[in-house]
Image (tube, rainbow, N blue to C red):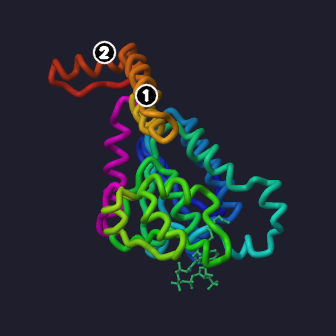
């Protein structure tokens, strides 16, 4: 499909989605939102695609936030009536059951930081900068920043970031557990692709189940989460890929996956 604000590309079993409004540091307009929802739905629906990478075009920004120019004159009633930002979580997080990685290549501010945190994990370039500067605009995070950042890095740091609007560099973000790994900018896409290909080579149903299990840790008590984990584990033991995976190990060969 032809998009106006993003680029999509299939590279083997990996879908690459690139935010492509470099002139506004990939600000997240409502068109970007709709196009991302379509691109993630297409990724989820295509059986040949087993991992996705989301990144920003240019060397400066992943996304510098929701589009301030679009929000500036929007009446409050519209934000409420359209419940605009709910669609990010329902489509990008909940409906995307396959794994995806955010490759953060520069500024990830406000909605940009929140979008990156919707990914299963973040790989950041050394020049990446994360922040929730909404307070400086008289607002607050609106796409999950107050919740996902707090769960990712703890109350003290999250509160400091939200109240001061300061940016966190990649080294601090890695130290704090916000990002899985930091790499030089020149290596970012190669590293993200290598990681995505590793995931895409796994038994696909097991990949989805592993994702579902880890995400459950955010929603459930320890007891509920452990039960959920055991039940999903037990379901996987009934798959053809489990029989193949264990046979392949014993026969010292690579497994061939069916995704069932
Ligand atoms: C619209 C944006 C933008 C944004 C940058 N631009 N961020 N346009 N929305 N969020 C535009 C600038 O207006 C400018 O275009 C061009 O991109 C380049 O940006 P500069 O500011 O000239 O670059 P620089 O001086 O290098 O500064 C980079 C920056 C700064 C530090 C990232 O752009 C910045 O502070 N941006 C805003 C960050 C922010 O507040 N994000 C949170 C948004 S609110 P022109 O054409 O003017 O030169 C949010 C809320 C979510 O996400 C939910 C709650 C409502």
Can you tell which mark lies on residue 243?
A: 2
Residue in the image at 23% along x and 17% along y: 247
Mark 1 sits on what residue?
A: 223
Residue in the image at 37% along x and 47% along y: 196
Q: Which residues are magenta?
A: 180-204
How far across and how far down the image is residue 113, in percent?
51, 63
Residue in the image at 30% along x and 15% along y: 243
Q: CA distance from mark 1 to mark 2?
A: 29 Å
Q: Quadrant of the C terminus?
A: top left
Question: Which image quarter: residue 147?
Answer: bottom right
How far across and how far down the image is residue 179, in percent?
37, 58
How far across and how far down the image is residue 99, in percent?
45, 42
| Element type at mark 1 | helix
Point out the quarter of the image occupied by ligand 1: bottom right
Residue in the image at 62% along x and 57% along y: 143
Residue 103 visible, this angle:
yes
Q: Of the residues tagged 1 and 2, which is closer to the observer?
A: 1
Mark 1 vs 2, N-terminal side: 1
| Element type at mark 2 | helix
């Amino acid at each position: 499909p032809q998009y106006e604000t993003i680029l999509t590309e299939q590279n083997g079993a990996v879908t690459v989605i690139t935010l492509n409004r470099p002139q506004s540091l990939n600000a997240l307009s409502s068109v970007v939102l709709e196009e991302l929802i379509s691109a993630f739905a297409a990724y989820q629906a295509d059986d040949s695609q087993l991992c996705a990478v989301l990144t920003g075009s240019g060397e400066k920004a992943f996304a510098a936030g929701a589009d301030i120019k679009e929000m500036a004159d929007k009446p409050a009633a519209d934000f409420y009536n359209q419940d605009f930002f709910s669609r990010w979580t329902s489509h990008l997080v909940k409906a995307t059951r396959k794994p995806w990685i955010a490759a953060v290549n520069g500024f990830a501010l406000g909605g940009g930081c929140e979008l990156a945190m919707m990914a299963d994990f973040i790989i950041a370039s050394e020049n990446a900068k994360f922040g929730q500067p909404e307070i400086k605009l008289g607002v607050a995070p609106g796409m999950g920043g107050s919740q996902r950042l707090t769960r990712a890095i703890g109350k003290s740091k999250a509160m400091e970031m939200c109240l001061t609007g300061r940016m966190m560099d990649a080294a601090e973000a890695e130290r704090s557990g916000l990002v899985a790994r930091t790499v030089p900018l020149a290596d970012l896409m190669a590293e993200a692709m290598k990681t995505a290909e590793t995931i895409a080579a796994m038994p696909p149903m097991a990949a989805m189940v592993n994702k579902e299990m880890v995400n459950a840790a955010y929603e459930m008590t320890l007891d509920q989460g452990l039960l959920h984990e055991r039940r999903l584990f037990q379901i996987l033991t009934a798959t053809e890929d489990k029989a193949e995976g264990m046979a392949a190990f014993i026969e010292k060969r690579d497994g061939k996956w069916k995704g069932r």
